[in-house]
Amino acid sequence: MAPALCSSPVGTLKRPSGLSRHASAAGFPFYTSGTWGFHKGYMRAALTYGHAAEAGETSVIEVEDIPSLLRDVARFAEAVEKLKDMVLGEVKEEPCSRPAVHECLGEVLRVLRQVISTYPLLNTVETLTAAGTLISKVKGFSYEGTTDAQKKDFEKAIETIAVAFSTVSAQEVDILLQRSEGGVDSALNYAKSIAKYMKDIISYVDKRIALENEFSKGLQRLYQSCKQNIIQEHMPLLSIISLALEQDSEQSCGLQQATNNIYTHSFLQPMTQRRQEHEKKRRDIKEQWQRAKRKLADAESNLRKARQLYMSRCEEYERARIVANKVEEEQSGTGSGSTTKALDKKRRLEEEARNKAEEAEATYRTCIADATTQQQELEDMKVNMLKQIQELIRQTDQILRACTISYYQTMHVQTAALPVHFQTLCESCKLYDPGQQYAAYVKNLQLRTEMPVQYQFEPFSASKRLCVVFAGRDHHQAHKSWPSTLSDTDSVGPGSGLGSPTSSTGMKQIQASLVYGINGIESENAAPTGPFRNVGLSKAAKTHRLRKLRTPSKCRECDSYVYFQGAECEECFLACHKKCLESLAIQCGHKKLQGRLQLFGRDFSQVLQGDVKGVPFIIKKCITEIERRALKMKGIYRVNGVKTRVEKLCQAFENGKELVELSQASPHDISNVLKLYLRQLPEPIMPFRMYNALMGLAKESLNSDASEAGEGVKSPELVDRGSETEPEVLVLVEKLRELLKRLPPANIATLKYIVQHLVSELEQDNKMSASNLGIVFGPTLMRPKPTGATVSLSSLVDYPHQARIVEALIVFQHVIFISSSSSVCSPGQSQVCTASYLH
């Protein structure tokens, strides 16, 4: 097909200007692998359309339309080449700036949208995903200090969008097999291989599940036999070993349920059933194909025989005709009667031979027609068979994919918790203080105090024998006889120092007072901050009155369980690991800390708790801290924070709410938390219903129609020049102000708070102009309603328009947010707000 295609009008297609150094001699947009590698995708797309058109498909374009396809694709290639040159700095005539690159990116996306709308077969998930990857790489490209890694990532994104054009569709597969010798047989062999492959997979999973089942039963037996022997009071690490045993029991039960489910529902049974259906259908298709081939073979055999008979009859007729002509010549020379009879006989033989030749010719033509009919039927059946085989393989692939996903998902559910459990047990073991349980055991004995034994020397006396007096024991006996002694001396008087007949009760009170005093001294020595005196506490941790953790609980900092050497606040009852006190970000609220609040991914109006005109506390908290110490930081909203620290801050906000202390957090982490919260809102601050209207205003302001027509009209700049502001900009601002009146009170208050924060007089320090802030916050404050596609092409094209709206909000906020009521200003307004605010 390649020569025919090159000889078509495609071969005379002129190469686009600016791309002659990459174009092929045949007229295709041909790029080397060092530049993009687009040639395979373009040529394959053209060949696909050409083959399908020749095959008579109605869902694709005609062959004569292929040149227009190549022109459109070449135009897209030219736009992407220009984008590449601008990003990598290959164009020296004009300076490379982020707005110019984004304008070029918008042109690329507009051309791409036109191409895939004209040719629907190119509108695939791969193409849209590749476009999204390209946009992310362009947005994240650092123009000040470019690294080799960034260049490689950008070039890889360019290659990816090229490969997206070369995806082979199901239609291409059928066309390729139809035009190949033995295509149906190859497809049937693949279908047979799939059946054997499924059999091997079933055997593997069956044996694997048998091992898992045997392991679960052995684990359950081990749990039952060791449970009673191991669990004893006051043994080291008893709680950890007990928890491990319980986890083994849960794992055993879960594995048994999972194996039963895999056997009966999710894998083995449906896979076996599908394999049987697959084999039955494959055999039926193969039998039909063999029957059709036998019919064609019979027709060809009959055709060969008829041809041989026809050739033989023609030779006989030719011989008879020659003989008759010879006899006729002899008769004309002699003129005898015997010669006339011979001539008549030869003529009869010639007539018979001619009749037989004509009959053979008719039979020959009939066999040709029959063979042609059988050949056409075989071709039609080939098309049908290939469609059936592909549908059979697709259904089998779907079942295999679904069963495999279910199998690994089931195994993942059973094993995903194990690393966390083992890590928790490991970390808990590290926190155990050796000898702790022994001390608890001794303390729990409640033994009687043993008095010291004193040995005294007694000199020899004739009337006494040498003895050893155990003064401690005598003293103990005297202590037992105190009540009777006191009762005998009740009347002794004040000199005894006992004072009244109730001296026995008084002695008991004295003893109780002594015990209480000792306990009081012990409790005073064990002050709440005693065990954590030498620990490096964070600023937030210093606000708590800490004591040793009494019962196992969840750490509010790392969200894992605390078993030993944990800390607990006496006032808010916050629990935390000893090592987590160094990074704790939740301050003490001097009352019991509430449970965890789902904050991210939740409608912010629910976070306001009835305050319909308020601003969510997380937005206020982050903006206040950024205004306090990060307004001069370069790229404050452009540079991302560290992922682990950002996740910890998000967790702290959900655990501590307004009590989160941000003074020790990185400003980039705080700004990332703010953007993440706005991005994960179920519905953005500027709702879905207003998105099309906002994009319409931006497109009208950007003169998108004129730019698409190639008129070169430059978009008006968003600059507040007072009375000299351009009329187009004033129209945009007025329409935007009227449109925002439709926002709910909470939305307008929050949007106003954020925009007033973004208006900064420190642009020279932080390099965050209104245009840059629009690029960052555009997709965050507004986005289209999500669809089923991985990446919505319309949302990709709308990035410049979203940035335009946010830039207009920032530049003209004093006009857009005019209100008779008191406005919501950010805490650092004196530092970041201009003097032209109108409230």
Image: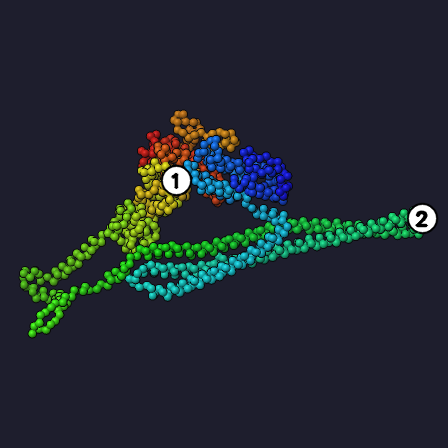
Residue at image point 88% right, 49% down:
326
Q: In this view, does 311 lie to the left or right of 48?
A: right
Q: Which residue lies furthest to the top in this view?
A: 724
Mark 2, secondary structure of its residue: helix
* Residue holding disc 2: 334
In percent of width and height, residue 830 lies at 31, 33
Whether residue 361 is visible, yes or no, is yes
**Quarter containing the C terminus:** top left
Residue at image point 40% right, 43% down:
680
Q: Residues within 10 Å of mark 2 (few under 14, many from 20)?
A: few
In percent of width and height, residue 572 lies at 28, 49
Q: Considering only vertical position in the picture, is 798 above or below 233?
A: above
Q: Which of 621 and 503 is in front in this view?
A: 621
Give amino acid for label 1: Val
Q: Distance between the residues labelled 1 and 2?
A: 121 Å
**Closer to the N terminus: mark 1 or mark 2?**
2
* Residue holding disc 1: 639
Q: Is residue 739 left or right of residue 8?
A: left
Mark 1, secondary structure of its residue: loop
Q: Considering only vertical position in the picture, is 231 above or below 726?
A: below
Quarter assignment of residue 215: bottom left
Give amino acid for label 2: Thr
Q: Considering only vertical position in the picture, is 234 above or below 646?
A: below
In percent of width and height, residue 511 lies at 15, 60
**Quarter containing the N terminus:** top right
In percent of width and height, residue 199 lies at 54, 59
Whether residue 136 is visible, yes or no, is no
Residue at image point 47% right, 60% down:
208
